[in-house]
Amino acid sequence: LDQRIQEILRCQVRERSRRLEDPSLLIIDTQSVRVAAGVPKETTGLDANKKTPGRKRGLAVDVLGLIIGVVVLAASAHDNEAGIALLDQAAERCGMRLEKVLVDQGFKDAVVIHGAVKDITVEVVRRNPDDEGKGFVPQPKRWVVEQVNGTLMLHRRLARDYDHRPDNAASRVYWASTAGMLRRLTTPTPTWRDDVELAA
């Protein structure tokens, strides 16, 4: 039910932005999140790369930052596992229109090969060598999924994973996404650009 509601609203937000219902380009990324004390140990793990114990949340989003797919795994799972599951979700929800998916360097050949099987081009976006040592540098288009991850962390129930079951944790993401899209559709919030134009 949560996915169906989220899908209906996603299509409406895209149409309001003068885009087709289904995107042709997606961005995939994962984020490791710590869990609460009562979460069963068998559904959690340690992200060896980020040294974070807990769960790994994978997202597939379009260029507007709208969520297409969510997967929640133990943090010890490799990014490839999340990437493959997200590609399956994206192919099912976007159909033949989906052409390309952008991922970071944490995803390996298994995701690229799985994308080819689904007739989806998976492009690994590599960091510019000139940006080494500068910390976080936004990459064109890929920064959108980073922004979505940051926005989700503003929701108390997503800043830490409290749910005993991973599918319930994924449902929390869909509801948070639904709340954001409802604000887009119902609240004509002025941006700083509007303020500048009014002042002029």
Image (spheres, grey):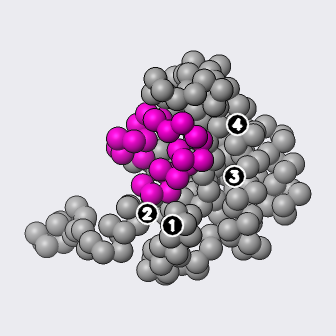
165 to 38, vertically: above or below: below
Q: Which residue is mark 2?
A: 178
Q: CA distance from mark 4 to mark 2?
A: 25 Å
Q: Which residue is mark 3?
A: 86
Q: Which residue is mark 4?
A: 79
Provide residue 144's location: percent of width, then percent of height.
50, 52
Between 123 and 112, the one lying in front of the other is 112
Q: Earlier in the sequence, mark 3 or mark 1?
A: 1
- Whether residue 37 appears in magenta in the rendering, the answer is no
Q: Amino acid at mark 4?
A: Asp
Q: CA distance from mark 3 to mark 2?
A: 19 Å
Q: Which residue is mark 1?
A: 6
Viewer-side label of 1, 4 = 1
* Disc sitting over residue 188 in the figure: none
Secondary element at image label 2: helix
Q: Amino acid at mark 1?
A: Gln
Q: Amino acid at mark 2?
A: Thr
Q: Residue at x 53, y 44 (%)?
A: 169
Q: Earlier in the sequence, mark 3 or mark 2?
A: 3
Secondary element at image label 3: helix
Provide residue 199's location: percent of width, then percent of height.
10, 69
Residues under numbered marks 1 and 4 in contact, where contact means CB atoms less than 8 Å apart: no
Q: Please state, as top left, top right, bottom left or bottom right, where the C terminus lies in the image.
A: bottom left
167 to 136, vertically: above or below: below
Residue 14 appears in the rendering: no
Q: Residue at x 47, y 44 (%)?
A: 149
Question: Magenta part mainly helix, strand or loop?
Answer: helix
**Could you classify mark 4 by the number of other residues whose Cα lies within 10 Å: few (under 14), some (14-19), or many (20 or more)?**
many
Q: Earlier in the sequence, mark 4 or mark 2?
A: 4
